[in-house]
Amino acid sequence: MVKVSVSSMFLWDCTPEEMLFILDESGLDGLELWAETPWYWERRCRPRFLDMAAVLGGRVRTVHAPVMDMNPSSYSDLVHQATIVETLRAVDMAHDLGVEVLTIHPGHRTARRAFRPADWKKFYRYLDACLIRSRRLGVILSLENLQEEIWNICYQPEEMAAVLEKYPLAMTLDISHATPPISRALSFVDRLFERIVNVHVSATVEGNKHMPPSDGSMDSVLMALRDAGYQGFLTLELDDKKYPNKMGKMEKASALRTESRHLLDIFG
């Protein structure tokens, strides 16, 4: 049976206690914890952080490595190295929380230009470094497809397939990143289904990413996953800033109930 959770990015302004309250009110199974929400960065003394994460009562299902200030493919060796360090910390965090899947991003070229061999070399060096730790600790690195931009990689199924053939990685399918067109998201499912262990579920509406999927626009992708026998994580990755009104805890819980019901209606 699929496991429906929510990305902590939707709960960006929440403490662990508030996150737990919203999970309980919404009826969701758990949480994908991003290792870069404010309370993580500001209170990351390791013992204290683990005490705070323990408040979530074992509800963390997956972890997402930091990406906002990070870039494994950066021109800057300092940024590249910092990204390795932060990803390794996320690997350790996943292990300490008993979580098996850590989502990572492939990064982008620093300039808004097409990737060069030198940029690929940086990315592969990042994977080599992170896989040593993750494999030793039993944490699966799951590479997420990015949205189509000239400076991004792994936004096409063929390119993602080539990386997954080269490295022992799983895949996090981000449906909103893959669309439009819907055919690309379906191609990811068709070509790489056996490697998909986590799905970031949201819609792209008139160019806006991470919108609520209950509008039905992504149902064909969800049904393709269902029909292929998907039993992994369905992670609602929603942008609370794109809702018409500012959301408090109860509003977020209500929105999550609506979205999770839609997913469960499809997956049964």
Image (spheres, rainbow, N blue to C red):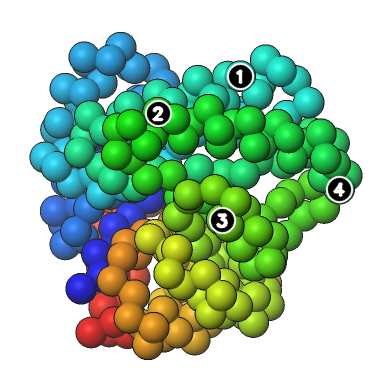
| Of pointers 1 and 3, the one earlier in the residue sequence | 1
Q: Does residue 214 lie above or below 25 as drawn?
A: below
Of residue 135 and residue 202, the one placed in the foreground of this image is 135
Is tag 2's residue or tag 3's residue first in the polypeptide sequence? 2
The quarter in which the N terminus is drawn is bottom left
Q: Nearer the viewer, residue 144 or 10?
A: 144
Residue 178, percent from left and from top: 62, 67
Q: Amino acid at mark 4?
A: Ala
- Disc 3 from disc 4: Cα separation: 20 Å
195 or 225, nearer to the observer: 195
Select label 2 or label 4 by which is in front: 2
Q: Which residue is mark 2?
A: 133
Question: Hey, which residue is sitting farthest right in the picture?
Answer: 113
Q: Position of residue 39 (x, y in %)?
A: 35, 25
Query: Tag on residue 164?
Result: 3
Earlier along the polypeptide chain: callout 3 or callout 4? 4
Q: Which residue is mark 1?
A: 81
What amino acid is at disc 2? Arg
Q: Is there any visible trace of residue 239 in the rendered image?
A: no
- In the displayed structure, 180 sits above or below 4; it is below
**In terms of secondary structure, where does tag 3 sit?**
helix
User: Pointers 2 and 1 in contact (CB under 8 A)?
Assistant: no
Residue found 70% across the figure and 31% down from its top: 122
Camera-side residue of 128 and 203 = 128
Circle number at residue 255? none
Image quarter for residue 25? bottom left
Residue 29 relative to residue 209: left or right: left
